[in-house]
Image (cartoon, rainbow, N blue to C red):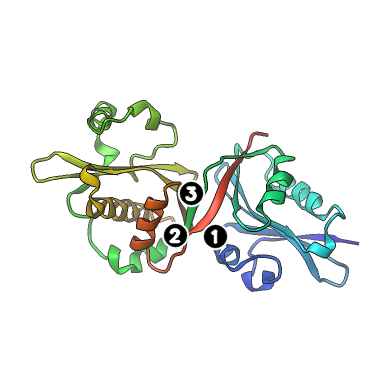
Amino acid sequence: MVKYKTVIKPVPEKYEELAPERVRYMLRGNKMHAIEAQEEDGRRIGMLAYSYSDKTAELIWIYVLPPERSRGTGSALMEKFFSKIQGFEFLYADLIVTDESAPLQSFLMAYRFRFQKDISYMFLKGAGELKRSQLLERPAIAQDCESLKDISIECFREIMTGFGLEPKVYDTEYLDLDLSSLHRDKKGNVNGILLVNRYGRKLVEPVLLRAKADDMTIEIKLLKSSLYLLDKLGSGASVYVKCISAQSGALIDMVLEDTHPIRVMHGICRG
């Protein structure tokens, strides 16, 4: 008989057989939970990891040992998971791309998850770790950059038009002007812009990183500014930095120390 146990603060080292290293690293974040499937002798045969913040829940990982599959263990884990997150407005699943991604995607789609086609790149860092990064040890945001929080919507749309972009595409309910930033030259002209979406307290997503003449120096300054602003929020929790662009991912890898991209497919459960 299989028993199911909810673990509020999972110990990553216990799941070496059930989760890859990058998932175990994610389990160190705040508000991470696990549901274990155990045999009567206590042996773990499956697990589901999830997190929640405010009104948002996220399925991080689900896995059942191959010899133990086709016994309903995965379905039981999902049922336990849904019972835990009743009442949440948003439910996401970032499916980590592995050799088993295709069958797992089909499994989750049976629970009304729908996945985008684009592969994203995810980085996980604790907000406290940002302060210790040598690239971020500065008393203010990067030189010549400023937050968009004090800029009017009309000015924002003018800036977007100046880059030849349609402002309404990026003017969404998830756009966080506190974390978005722009770069000006000494004459006050806007040379670069970074727009950041934020979902709850844990997930931030650079949705637009643009610099005139494709100046990488400006792009790095913009990313450093946003990360500084994120650190100033003082949440103390682990955060995800997600980007669809491989180029942006490479830049983030340069700005944040000791990170490696995790390839994911973003899924949303519509209920």
Q: For the residue marked with disc 2, what is the amino acid?
A: Gly
State the residue position of label 1. Answer: 30
Q: Residues within 10 Å of mark 3 (few under 14, many from 20)?
A: some
Question: Which type of secondary structure does the marked residue at label 3 adopt?
Answer: strand
State the residue position of label 2. Answer: 236
CB of mark 3 within 8 Å of CB of mark 1?
no
Quarter-of-image position of residue 49: bottom right
Q: For the residue marked with disc 3, what is the amino acid?
A: Leu
Q: Residues within 10 Å of mark 2 (few under 14, many from 20)?
A: some
CB of mark 2 within 8 Å of CB of mark 1?
yes
Q: Report the mark closest to the observer, 3 or 1.
A: 3
Residues at marks 2 and 1, CA–CA distance in whole angstroms: 9 Å
Nearest to the observer: residue 168 or residue 163: 163
**Does residue 225 lie above or below 256 as drawn?**
above
Is residue 119 found left or right of 70 in the rendered image?
Answer: left
State the residue position of label 3. Answer: 203
Q: For the residue marked with disc 1, what is the amino acid?
A: Asn
